[in-house]
Structures are given as structure tokens and as C-alpha cells.
Image: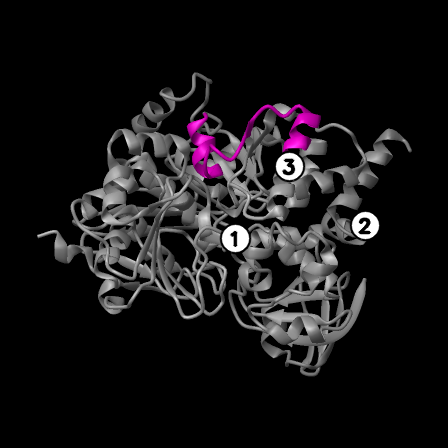
């Protein structure tokens, strides 16, 4: 019987010849990512009682969660991080003018097929889009890796998700992943590796694959994974000359489950308050009034997403009473969107263009909600209180659905305007 | 290792945002202050009334969402002695152990325990005793118990590194 990607890469990284799902292995990661939480991790690291991190070259730190600093406390946090990276000679540091960590790491060439990446952020699963094994860990664990270069991981069982059919007009990768999460539930892939495969995935661009892997954690998955192909190699060639080895599941690998989805008749999907798995087709929630519309975050702030948004808004004005916030996921995306004239058009339509970063996704700043308000967002979480107010409601959708809804001031079916 | 405490009971998918809201993640750094906001957006009574060694009993996927360790830290410093659930989200599971907060995965116990009752948990034996009887759960592996006994991952690593240096 063959092996899954998860089994093969963890066997390689643990130095064992072969491992099986369920086994606990000790591994040394290739990259360890942390962001605005680095100051808190540094404090834990200092408690361990050693002076220097073991491998500064493995540490990557982009600031993104509250950039630029919203208050004195956030500013102090950033200052402590800048001091720490100086002290520890950490060169892979990206200050507030770079973007969201999960966009920045691939753009800067840290994410390669066959690498093991751990991050102090749950959406670290995003890098599976490039064939990396990547998952989120806590602050103490990052501090511990800085000190020892080791961590224990359990080899996960793997669920394979085959996506078949033809993508209908108005349907995007976000709709596909919301549909899957709604179907499997918030713990539908708990502790599992999830491999996305099938013709739809092969046809999908890298940005779409990132959206899928980013949200795999919303069904409890340890990692998301897409087998690298020509598209992956092409994307990476433009950004790095580092060597890498592609690791794939064997054709006779043992999967815990194989699930097929045919998306040929999928409707646009909406995750309704207050859980990501409370997913409904747009027809059931169309007409819900919105106060704020958000395009951005590590889920949907890429150039592909901004292009779709501008195509829908071109020459039109957003509805009175709606605030449309656009956060390009990185400065690279921001610059490209400027070159293409996208930002200029969005401004004409009434959007507020924000700086690259996480924005109000986790309720820290730049567009928090008031009691009774409704936000339709391209983000990945809609938990109660998520955007700063527990009496507000957050709905999640694709950039196309958010864009069209900002024109009408209510949740709208994009397919009505495609004719 | 065993504890006895009063039960606070909750449902499925208790997420990290209702346990410790994102708006506090970079502004509150003192664990005692974190404890004042524990479960703030789910049960505002909790942080005011929780007593040392009280036990949280919940449904599936406890701690889903963010990797924020403060979700475990705030419960630990609020005095919570253990969390019993049908299942745990994987990052929360690691964070809780790494904060020295014991977890029990036991579906039957989670279904049979009533809010407010006093229960006893023996972690080494893998036994939970409540009004409706005694329920067994697989004890945590030695390596994980070791982290718990040392009070969390940081003191645990500190101890190991000292031992390696022969201190």
C-alpha cells in the first residue's frame, strides 16, 4: 500500500524511513513564521533561559495584524519586535509596508513544495497550495522551536476531496470551499490532512488554491494540500531560484475517506453568522441589508480578487450607506493593482483603499463594526465578536458576491448581473 | 494527578473568538488580566463567578478557530482545572497542554455531566466520576503528562535544556 503526502513528508523530515498515520514524530521545520505575536513569543523564549535562537535563518516575521499601529500599545508591541529581530540577527523581517503573512511568505519565496512550515497563526494551512506541509501552532511552541529547532507532530490521516464538473458563471474558489465546509462541518476534517484534487483544481489558478487551503482549517484540518503542477512551478520560478523537491501522494495511498463534489450546478455560497459552517446558497439570504463590505484578508485579497471586484464595479457607484473597504493582501498586490488601474476604478466607485494587512478581520482596527451592523466579507471567519463587536453580524462570501452586494446595499446573487 | 470541581457546561464549536476576543490579542499581555475576559462573548457571568479548579464541559470541536494561545491562557488563569469535551480543535489542544491546562476527550462524560454539579477527574487512571456514574477515557500519553506536570511547555523545555547541560 502506498503512502500519502503527509506520511511521506513527515517520514522525510523526521529522518525515519517510513511513518504511518497516527504516529507521533519529532521534526525540524524548514520555516517558522510569526507576526505581530512575535513580542509575546520573545517573552516566552526569554523565560526558557537561553540567549540566542538556534536558527535565525529559519525565522520569518512579517508584521500584519495591526499595521500601522492603532494605539500606543500596538506601537509598543511593534517596537519590541523590531528590537528583538535586531538582537537576534533575524534578517527575514518584513515591516508594516509588506502585507499579510500568508501572502508575503509565498511572494518572497519562502514557501516551496516539499517543505515543512509552522506558523503562529491558524491560517498557516495556506501554503499547502504550493505542496508544502504547513500548519498553525501556538506561541509557546514557536518559542520552543526557536530554542530547540524541534517539535512533535502527529502524522495525520488524509481525506481526499475530488472536485469535478465545470465551474458555472459567477462561482469562484471561495464558493467551492464554503460549500465543502458547510457540508462537512466545522470539525468535518478535524486533525486530518485534506488533499484537494480533480480537474477543477488542476484548472484553478494559484490564488484560488490558496483560498481553498487557507480555509481548510475552518473544517478543523491540520493541513490543506494541492499537488504541485506546471502552474505551481511557473509561479515559483518568477520568485525564487531555491531548489525544491515535489512530494506527492502515491497513486495507491491509503486515504481515510475520498469525497467527491460535482460543482456544475453550485450557487454562490454565503457563510452566515456566527459560524463558518453555517453555509447557505445565496438564494436563501439574498436581500439581507449590509452596512459594510470588505474585500481582502489572507483568504481573498489577491490580484485575481481585486480584478474580479473592479470588473463588477467598473463605471458604477456603490450603494448609499454601504462602506466598501478594500485591503490588497500585500504591497506587491497593491502595486500591481495600481499598474492595472484597478485601484483608481475602485476609488471612483466609492471604495476606500486601505493598506495591505489583516485590517478589521480580527476586530483590531481599520473598520470595526457597531452593534446591529452587518458586514459582508471575503475573510475566513465570522465568529461572534470577530470584527470587534459581539452584537454585529458577519457574512462571508466570494469577492464577486461582496462586490455586487456593495452596489445594491444587500446580499445579492451575482448571477443576476451576468446576463 | 486528579482534580475536583464544579461544572460549567457549554455546547459544540466553542471558538477562540468567544473565549478570548481578537480585539484584546495584542493589547492585553498580563495573564491575570486575560482571565478577566475569559469566555466574554459566550458567557459574561463566567469570568466573574468561576472558582479555582472549576471544570468546563463542552461538546465537539472545543477551541476551534485562531491559534491564539491566550484562549488557553485566559482559562488557565481564570482557575479552570480541566476541560472535558467530545473533541478539541487541534491547535487549542496543543495550546492547553502547553499552558499546563489538562484536557479530557470523553464523549460519554460530556453527554452525562450536568451543569453546576461537582465532578472528579483522575488523569493517570483516565476516570471521570460524576452523579451519573464513572466514565473512562484514554489517559494522556506519558510525554504529554510530563508537560502538564512541569506546568506547561516553557518550564518543561527549560528543565530539559538544563538537564542536557548537566545543571
Under tag 3, what secondary structure?
helix
In this view of the protein, can residue A289 be seen by the observer?
yes
Q: How far apart are marks 1 and 2 (CA)?
A: 34 Å
**Mark 1 highlights which residue?**
A364
Q: Which residue is drawn at 58% across and 48% down?
A: A71
Q: Which residue is drawn at 19% across and 43% down?
A: A311
Q: Residue at x 65, y 73 (%)?
A: B46
Q: Quadrant of residue B140?
A: bottom right
The chain that hosts pointer 3 is: A
**Mark 3 highlights which residue?**
A79
Asked whether residue A103 is drawn in magenta, I would say yes
Are labels 1 and 3 on one chain?
A: yes
Q: In which quarter of the image is residue A266?
A: bottom left
**Mark 2 highlights which residue?**
B150
Residue A57 x %, y %: 61, 23
If you read the primary sequence from the N terminus, does the residue marked by circle 1 or circle 3 appear first? Answer: 3
Residue B113 x %, y %: 64, 78
Residue B152 numbered tag: none
Q: Which residue is drawn at 67% across and 35% down?
A: A145
As rendered, which of B2 and B76 lies closer to the eye? B76
Contact check, label 3 and label 2, Cβ < 8 Å: no
Q: Left or right of A77: which side holds A338? A: left
Are labels 3 and 2 on one chain?
A: no
Contact check, label 1 and label 2, Cβ < 8 Å: no
In this view of the protein, can residue A54 be seen by the observer?
no
Under tag 2, what secondary structure?
loop
Question: Most extreme residue toward the right, as rendered?
Answer: B167
Q: What stretch is highlighted in magenta?
A: A81-108
Q: Which quarter of the image is occupied by the N terminus of chain A?
A: top left
Characterize the local packing of mark 1: few (<14), some (14-19) or many (20 or more) Cα atoms within 10 angstroms: many
Residue A411 x %, y %: 26, 62
Q: Left or right of A62: which side holds A237? A: left
Amino acid at each position: 500500500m502506498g503512502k500519502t503526502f503527509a506520511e511521506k513528508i513527515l517520514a522525510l523530515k523526521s529522518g525515519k524511513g517510513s511513518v504511518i498515520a497516527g504516529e507521533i514524530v519529532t521534526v525540524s521545520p524548514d520555516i517558522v513564521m510569526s507576526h505581530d505575536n512575535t513580542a509575546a513569543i520573545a517573552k516566552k523564549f526569554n523565560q526558557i533561559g537561553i540567549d540566542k535562537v538556534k536558527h535565525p535563518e529559519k525565522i520569518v516575521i512579517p508584521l500584519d495584524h495591526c499595521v500601522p499601529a492603532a494605539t500606543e500599545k500596538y506601537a509598543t508591541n511593534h517596537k519590541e519586535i523590531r528590537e528583538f529581530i535586531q538582537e537576534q540577527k533575524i534578517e527575514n523581517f518584513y515591516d508594516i509596508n509588506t502585507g499579510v503573512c500568508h501572502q508575503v511568505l509565498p511572494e518572497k519565496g519562502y514557501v516551496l513544495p516539499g517543505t515543512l512550515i509552522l506558523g503562529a497563526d491558524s491560517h498557516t494551512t495556506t501554503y499547502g497550495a504550493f505542496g508544502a506541509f504547513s500548519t498553525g501552532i501556538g506561541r509557546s511552541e514557536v518559542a520552543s522551536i526557536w530554542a530547540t529547532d524541534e517539535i512533535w507532530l502527529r502524522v495525520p490521516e488524509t481525506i481526499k476531496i475530488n472536485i469535478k464538473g465545470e465551474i458555472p458563471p459567477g462561482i469562484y474558489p471561495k464558493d467551492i470551499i464554503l460549500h465543502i465546509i458547510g457540508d462537512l462541518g466545522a470539525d468535518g476534517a478535524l486533525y486530518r490532512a485534506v488533499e484537494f484534487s480533480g480537474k477543477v483544481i488542476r484548472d484553478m489558478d494559484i490564488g484560488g488554491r490558496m483560498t481553498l487551503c487557507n480555509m481548510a482549517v475552518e473544517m478543523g484540518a491540520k493541513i490543506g494540500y494541492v499537488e504541485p503542477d506546471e502552474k505551481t512551478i511557473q509561479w515559483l520560478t518568477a520568485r525564487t531560484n531555491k531548489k525544491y523537491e515535489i512530494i506527492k501522494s502515491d497513486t495507491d495511498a491509503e486515504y481515510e475517506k475520498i469525497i467527491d463534489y460535482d460543482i456544475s450546478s453550485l450557487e454562490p455560497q454565503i457563510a452566515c453568522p456566527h459560524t463558518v459552517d453555517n453555509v447557505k446558497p445565496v438564494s436563501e439570504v439574498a436581500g439581507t441589508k449590509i452596512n459594510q463590505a470588505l474585500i481582502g484578508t489572507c483568504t481573498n485579497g489577491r490580484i485575481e480578487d481585486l480584478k474580479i471586484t473592479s470588473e463588477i464595479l467598473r463605471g458604477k457607484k456603490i450603494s448609499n450607506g454601504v462602506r466598501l473597504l478594500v485591503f490588497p493582501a500585500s504591497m506587491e498586490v497593491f502595486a500591481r493593482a495600481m499598474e492595472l488601474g484597478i485601484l483608481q476604478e475602485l476609488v471612483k466607485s466609492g471604495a476606500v483603499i486601505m493598506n495591505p494587512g489583516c485590517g478589521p478581520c480580527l476586530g483590531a482596527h481599520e473598520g470595526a463594526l457597531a452593534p446591529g451592523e452587518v458586514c459582508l466579507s471575503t475573510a475566513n471567519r465570522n465568529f461572534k465578536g470577530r470584527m470587534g463587536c459581539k452584537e454585529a453580524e458577519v457574512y462571508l462570501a466570494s469577492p464577486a458576491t461582496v462586490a455586487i452586494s456593495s452596489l445594491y446595499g444587500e446580499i445579492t446573487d451575482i448571477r443576476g448581473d451576468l446576463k | 494527578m486528579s482534580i475536583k470541581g464544579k461544572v460549567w457546561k457549554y455546547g459544540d464549536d466553542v471558538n477562540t473568538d468567544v473565549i478570548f476576543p481578537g480585539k484584546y490579542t495584542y493589547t492585553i499581555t498580563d495573564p491575570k488580566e486575560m482571565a478577566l475576559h475569559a469566555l466574554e462573548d459566550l458567557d459574561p457571568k463566567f469570568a466573574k463567578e468561576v472558582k479555582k479548579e472549576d471544570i468546563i464541559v463542552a461538546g465537539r470541536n472545543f477551541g476551534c478557530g485562531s491559534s491564539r494561545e491566550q484562549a488557553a491562557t485566559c482559562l488557565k488563569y481564570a482557575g479552570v482545572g480541566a476541560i472535558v469535551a467530545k473533541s478539541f480543535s487541534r491547535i487549542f489542544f496543543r495550546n492547553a497542554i502547553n499552558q499546563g491546562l489538562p484536557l479530557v476527550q470523553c464523549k460519554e462524560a460530556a453527554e452525562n455531566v450536568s451543569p453546576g454539579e461537582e465532578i472528579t477527574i483522575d488523569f493517570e487512571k483516565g476516570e471521570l466520576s460524576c452523579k451519573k456514574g464513572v466514565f473512562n477515557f484514554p489517559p494522556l500519553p506519558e510525554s504529554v503528562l510530563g508537560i502538564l506536570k512541569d506546568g506547561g511547555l516553557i518550564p518543561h523545555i527549560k528543565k530539559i535544556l538544563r538537564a542536557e547541560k548537566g545543571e
